[in-house]
Amino acid sequence: MSNGSIRPDEVTDILRRELGDFETEAEEYEAGTVLEAGDGIATLYGLSNAQASELVEFPEQDVEGMVLNLEEDNVGVILFGDVDAVSEGDEARRTGRIASVGVNENMLGRVIDPLGRPLDGKGPIEGEKTVLPLERKAPGVIYREPVEEPLQTGIKAIDSMIPVGRGQRELVIGDRQTGKTAVLTDTIINQKKTHQEGTDSGDPVYCVYVAVGQKDSTVAQVQRDLERNGAMEHTVIVNASASMPTPLQYVAPFAGACIGEYFRDTGRDSLVCFDDLSKQAVAYRELSLLLRRPPGREAYPGDIFYLHSRLLERAAKIISDEEVATQMNGLPDALQDKVQGGGSLTALPVIETQAGDVSAYIPTNVISITDGQIYLETDLFNSGIRPAIDVGNSVSRVGGSAQIDAMKDVASTLRIDLSQYRELEAFAKFGSDLDPSTQQQLNRGERLVEILNQDQFSPVPVEEQVAIIYAAINGHLDDVPVDDIEDFEEEYLERLRLRHEDVLTEIRETEELTDAAEEVFEEVAADMADVYAEDEEEEEEDVLADEGATA
């Protein structure tokens, strides 16, 4: 045999080697066909085993969707991504994964879409993510604790009369342009001090701001405001603006709740602001109609109520007992080994009303689900009162449990005093001669309104709130001209900071109002009131002298 001939044993050896590396792997998937597509939805045939909220992929278009409608002969899917790319006849495959979002600490300071993808141009979100389902059962009664710790907003009118506790759901409700977003941004900014060491402001609060159906410019403005005030470092912005597809606007609040739950279930405090849920309801209504959901399902009152209740019920204060907390119902597998007790998720949903109609479907629904409401009035806003809170109607069902003892001591009569003032104010316009006590009530009410007025981006620490409210309710401002109230407050607090820092620190640390603190407030307020009253008398004398000279 010549050297050029082929040896069979060599061929066998080569074939054996090559085939040894080759693994047969059959790819198995369930596929279906798009029957109809358009407006952010697709109807699929052939995916009879699909689950509700399961992700479906369209491999050729690189688009994903989420199953929303399960019918006998077809499946209704809402599309994420380039919704116009999917058309009739395209292939669709089951993924077996439930719609979820990956969460980790590196999301703080970022702007993301409802699927967790960054939108701020700062590159990908690094680090290992905990994948949590968008929809999840709310913690049962056994796993909850009563709300007892305040979530300070830094807004005097809210912290004194409508307090928000950690784990509460407090609705912010009002017409367009009444300052709803301002209340949320101020609350987020006020949480900055919980992240600063040595401030004794309670445990850190991690914030999520969910923008649903807002203009992109509005969301950019919120981001800028938070950055300027140093609050973006502890905040995630979930953006589903008006320019984004309707399905993303529908799932955005659920994504925000997921991020909040991640912090809550790992033993920390979180705050989620939903701005606003009226737009989510509109998005859901649109999808329901497009998917032609069976009668009774797409009905506005019922279905929207269910939508918002399963979202807001997820706000809770988790039991501190670690052993019980680890057995929490509906806990995703990804969190099983990370669970810690004592965390909380506070929800601040926003609802926009039409011409102040709070008895419409959606406002009524969300009012019944939440633990309190902050009503913002157009008339008050237009008359220059900021925040424009209607004190008479606004309420916190958690009440004093969400206040420090010092605030409870000074603010207990504040609500009644203000409500009475509002009534008397209306009456006084028609009455000519008023008795001295009515006159005195009106006088004090005017000053209380002025005290509770507050500019945006200027949160007031709780101990300073206690100090100024103490001075107001004890009559130290009664003789101070209304126009000078703002100057009085500024000077009064400045004097306390410079000369009596120890008193303010004590209130912050002990949360109590001692007799010694009351004495200091009395002394400083009385001194300053005398100065302002003398100034007014001098001004009046000057005016009279000028008039005499003119005559």
Image: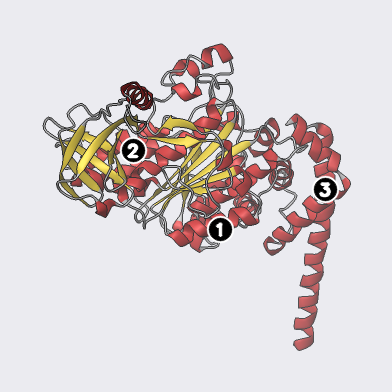
Q: Which mark is residue 51?
A: none
- The mark total stands at 3
Mark 1 secondary-structure assignment: loop
Sooner in the amino-acid sequence: mark 1 or mark 3: 1
Three-letter residue code for mark 2: Asn
Q: Which mark is residue 365?
A: 2
Sooner in the amino-acid sequence: mark 3 or mark 2: 2
Say which quadrant the N terminus sits in. Answer: top left
Three-letter residue code for mark 3: Arg
What residue would you read off at disc 3?
Answer: 497
In this orientation, does residue 392 appear?
A: yes
Residue 127 picture quarter = top right
Where does residue 538 sit, x and y in percent of width and height? 82, 69
Q: Residue furthest right?
A: 499
What residue would you read off at disc 1?
Answer: 385
526 on left or right of 201: right
Which residue is drawn at the image coordinates 49% and 27% (left, top)?
316
Which residue is drawn at the image coordinates 86% and 43% (left, top)?
500
What colouring does the structure picture have?
A: secondary structure
Three-letter residue code for mark 1: Ile
519 on left or right of 33: right
Which of 534 and 253 lies nearest the eye of the viewer?
Answer: 253
Q: Residue furthest front?
A: 1
Which of 409 and 178 lies nearest the eye of the viewer?
Answer: 178
